[in-house]
Amino acid sequence: MAESSIAQKGQIALVTGGGTGIGYNIAKALSAEGYVVVITGRRNDVLEKAAADLGAATGGTVRAIACDIGVAEQVAGLFSKIKAEFGRLDLLVNNAGTNVPAIPLEEVTFEQWNGVVAANLTGAFLCTQQAFKLMKSQEPRGGRIINNGSISATTPRPNSAPYTATKHAITGLTKSTALDGRPYDIACGQIDIGNAATDMTSKMSSGVLQANGEIASEPTIPAEHIARAVVYMASLPLEANVLSMTVMATKMPLVGRG
């Protein structure tokens, strides 16, 4: 374990949606391992505070760069800044995502659908595309990409069509990225997260709709567990890859019939 920690000193990581929730915890864990961490998101004030707090907590270098990852020009600008300031990128964590309220499929507006697709899928693709360009050309060549797939990448909740559709698509993007990255020493894996305790899952304890129509509370787990799993995935040499990992609350109603 000591060898991998030494190897990670000074490596550059980008965490999208890194100012809050799971992304914040991932950024904190990576910074503690010696990575230079860039966090990005749409709200500059949130990012700047997060970067200051993370740097104070870990003693590491954490850089905030605001970006709407659903906009191609902004993503290109983000990676241009990373290349100019750090010269390379060793790890991309495609974590950013959003959702809409749990409403019947036929009530989802076109604007809501497009918003979820832009944040959850288009943003991950655009960041992956720019990471490929940088990772293929840098010396030493290569890098790693880790996608936040969510439990919804395999199993939907009721009234979750936009979110579930994008997360299923992330699985396809992960596999295509892993395949297309092979010749260039770019590894790609996916972590599917079940009920990590964040603002997005704050309603779990008070009860959420189940597939049988009942309302039931669900257990959650600290987001730190997710961060530790990401650090493990990132610690592997590029010749090894965790293609898919599920980290979930043990008693959440996923396996079996609830």
Image (spheres, rainbow, N blue to C red):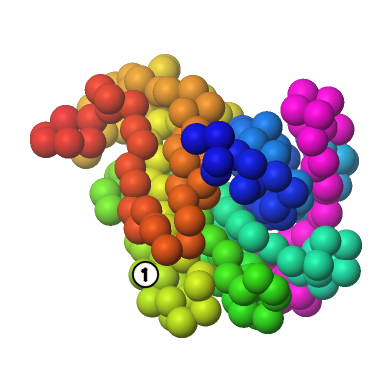
Residue 197 x/y as whole percent: 50, 26
Left or right: 65 in relation to 168:
right
Q: Position of residue 105 (x, y in %)?
A: 37, 57
Q: Residue at x 39, y 58 (%)?
A: 241
Query: Mark 1 belongs to which amino acid?
Result: Lys
Q: Viewed as shown, does residue 167 lie left or right of 31?
A: left
Classify 76 as above or below 215: below
Quarter where residue 35 is shown: top right
**Residue 96 seen anywhere in this rendered image of the structure:** no
Q: Position of residue 161 (x, y in %)?
A: 37, 57
Is residue 53 located in the magenta-colored stretch of the structure? yes
Q: Residue at x 52, y 49 (%)?
A: 234
Residue 164, relative to residue 245: is it above or below? below
> What residue lies at 74% left-to-right and 66% top-to-bottom?
88
Q: Which residues are magenta?
A: 52-76
Name the residue beneath numbered marker 1: 175
How many numbered marks appear? 1
Looking at the picture, how far across and down is residue 185, in whole percent? 50, 72
Q: Is residue 210 visible?
A: yes
Return the residue found at the far front.
3
Q: Is residue 178 above or below residue 133?
A: above
Q: Tell which of 205 and 213 is nearer to you.
A: 205
